[in-house]
Image (spheres, grey):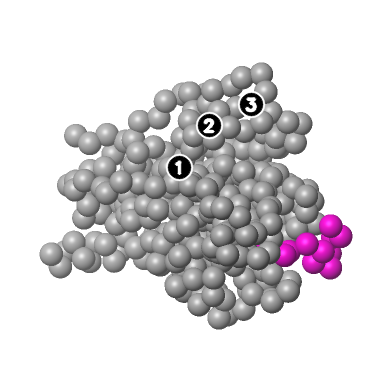
Amino acid sequence: MAKPALMTAWWRDFEISRRAIYVRATDTTVPITWANVKSVFSHISYYSLEKLYGLRRFGKKPTFSIHCVPSRPRAWYLLWATSYRAGLDLNAAANKADALLYFEDQTTIAERAQSPQDALPSINKNCRDISKSHVARIFEDIFGYNLAVDPQSYDGLMAVKSEINGAHDGHIIQGPCPAKAGWVYQRLIDTVNDGVDDDMAMDLRCPSVGGKIPLIFIKRRPAGQRFANFNASCTLEKTDDYLSADEQDKLSAFCAAMALDWGGLDVLRDKTDGRIYVVDVNKTDMGPPTALPMSDKFQAVNTLSDALTHWINDKVLQGHKNMDAE
């Protein structure tokens, strides 16, 4: 009998030293700073309240049963909060599941071997490459203008980042310059001084469910720390207030081309040309953002859980129809 994806004790996901925490899944190192410590305690508070809120479902049948491959989302991932609020059972055995969830932190995934569960509806099964170079290629295909640049010929400021998911190692350099293997070079998107906060860079974190964006997290941080993994502030906003209908359609097409069923898009709007750019894709994004007020965290997760429930319902029904047809 197939068993649910195994989960080791949560602390085995990390290797802690005096100054940093090594994250095994993404092969990245996170410095131990006061800002990061505050983020941890903020999320613990949210997690505790979410668990208390979830007691109302005690004894109720799960909305859907999901088998996770190769592991289940931990409590610090946005998908955990959303699934928990939606009443999804993420512990189901493959032979009793309504759908499969492929939850993988790795930047690229090798070709998958066939299994008896392939006929089940799946989530993110075919999203196997979220490297920044791949994201930039798909973005240019869908939007018709480029994010990536050739560092050896580009005359201007460039954002330089490694391909690795979750590294947060971006920095700015002046082009032209020689290219280094393992790094991507992008035009520097100007999001500073957006009329709300002086000397703050603004990011649009767009959670995507089935290619739709139910809401937007507006993240702001000092311009000199625009690539850092922290936010000076975060607000919950309506999608239509920040993205046009055409932009939303293109982002939906982008998600389809990436085979991204669930994930977070990092979108920047350049104040010089007014256009949006997708600079990163994360299918295992953490959240809700720690800088978001507690009431907005609950509202955001509630909105996302409704969207996820409806999308999985449609996907499961369609999957069963396809199985019956075969």
Query: Helix, strand, or loop for circle 1?
Result: loop
Magenta stretch, residue numbers = 188-199
Q: Relative to the observer, which residue lies in front, 318 or 239?
A: 239
Q: Quadrant of the C terminus?
A: bottom left
Q: Residue at x 54, y 62 (%)?
A: 150
Q: Is residue 303 magenta?
A: no
Disc 3 packing (10 Å; few <14; some 14–19; many ≥20): few
The picture places residue 51, in percent across and down from the top left corner, at 58, 37
Quick check: 267 above or below 55?
A: below
Q: Judge whether residue 178 can be spotted in this image.
A: yes
SS at badge 2: strand
In contact (CB < 8 Å): disc 2 and disc 1: yes
Q: Nearer the viewer, mark 3 or mark 1?
A: 3
The span from disc 3 to disc 1 (Cα, nearest Å) is 19 Å
Q: Earlier in the sequence, mark 2 or mark 1?
A: 2
Q: Which mark is residue 105?
A: 1
Circles 3 and 2: CB distance less than 8 Å? no
For label 2, the residue is 23
The numbered mark, 3 or 1, whose residue comes first in the sequence reads: 3
Q: In the rendered structure, which amino acid carries the disc numbered 3?
A: Ala
Three-letter amino acid code at disc 1? Asp
Write down the residue under mark 3. 20
**Distance between mark 2 and mark 1 Cα atoms:** 10 Å
